[in-house]
Amino acid sequence: MEALDIRDIKGPVKLISNLSAYFIAGLILLIIIGIILFFLSRKKKKEKMVFMPPKPPHEAAYEALEALKKKHLIENGRIKEFYIELSFIVRRYLEYRFNLRAPEMTTEEFLIHVKNRNELSYDEKYFLKNFLSHCDIVKFAKYVPTAKEIDSSFDSAKNLIDETKNTDDRRLETQMITDKDNICDHL
């Protein structure tokens, strides 16, 4: 009886059946193909991107002024916030237009910096000083300007941008107007 109880050693147990091995290999292959396709599609998207030149600083400033108007801050009694944004628009314009770090400086530091540069005329520097000083009085001294002063400040910001546009842009606009007039003369 004892001889019947003796059995041979079982073979090694397969951890993965053949079907499981094919499934795992296929899954790994699909992941690799997916990664390759992902990187190839990203490369094609980069190739399709078209470089758009940045807007000229005066165009960006005009858009910001229009957006400021549409916020209706004055009508809602948020005059200080209006002046903060108005002076920021002018400072950001000057930064991009003349390569000045206007937003990071106090008004006094900025005016001293501008005084030593030749990009702005004497009249433009004087105008800028009055504009920024008026904005600071409203922002920091709790001065409440009249409706006329508010409109004047907004117009002053726009006029400063008009007067300091890139001369190439001014020349182009003048040429376009001249060409338009010439075309009308020939009709």
Image: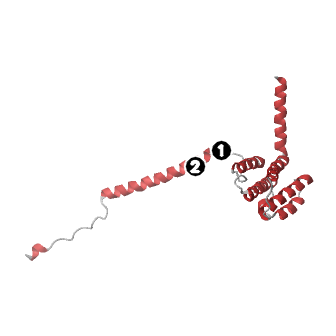
Query: Residue 64, relative to residue 187: is it above or below?
Result: below
Q: Nearer the viewer, mark 1 or mark 2?
A: 1
Pointer 1 with pointer 2, Cβ within 8 A: no
Query: Residue 126 or 49: which is nearer the viewer?
Result: 126
Amino acid marked by disc 2: Lys
Q: Where, by quadrant of the figure, is residue 77 drawn?
A: bottom right
Query: Residue 3 or 126: which is nearer the viewer?
Result: 126
Q: Which mark is residue 50?
A: 1
Amino acid marked by disc 1: Val
Query: Residue 129 or 99: which is nearer the viewer?
Result: 129
Q: CA distance from mark 1 to mark 2?
A: 14 Å
Residue 32 location in percent, x, y?
Answer: 46, 54
Residue 159 location in percent, x, y?
Answer: 83, 48
Q: Who's the residue at 10% across and 72% down the image?
A: 4
- Is any part of residue 137 visible from this angle? yes
Query: Residue 18, relative to residue 50: is it above or below?
Result: below
* Other residues around mark 2 within 10 Å, as few (<14) / some (14–19) / many (≥20): few
Residue 21 shown left or right of residue 100 in the figure: left
Q: Which mark is residue 43?
A: 2
* Other residues around mark 1 within 10 Å, as few (<14) / some (14–19) / many (≥20): few
For the N terminus, the image quarter is bottom left
Residue 162 location in percent, x, y?
Answer: 83, 46
Q: Give the mark nearer the N terminus: 1 vs 2.
A: 2
Residue lying furthest top in this view? 187
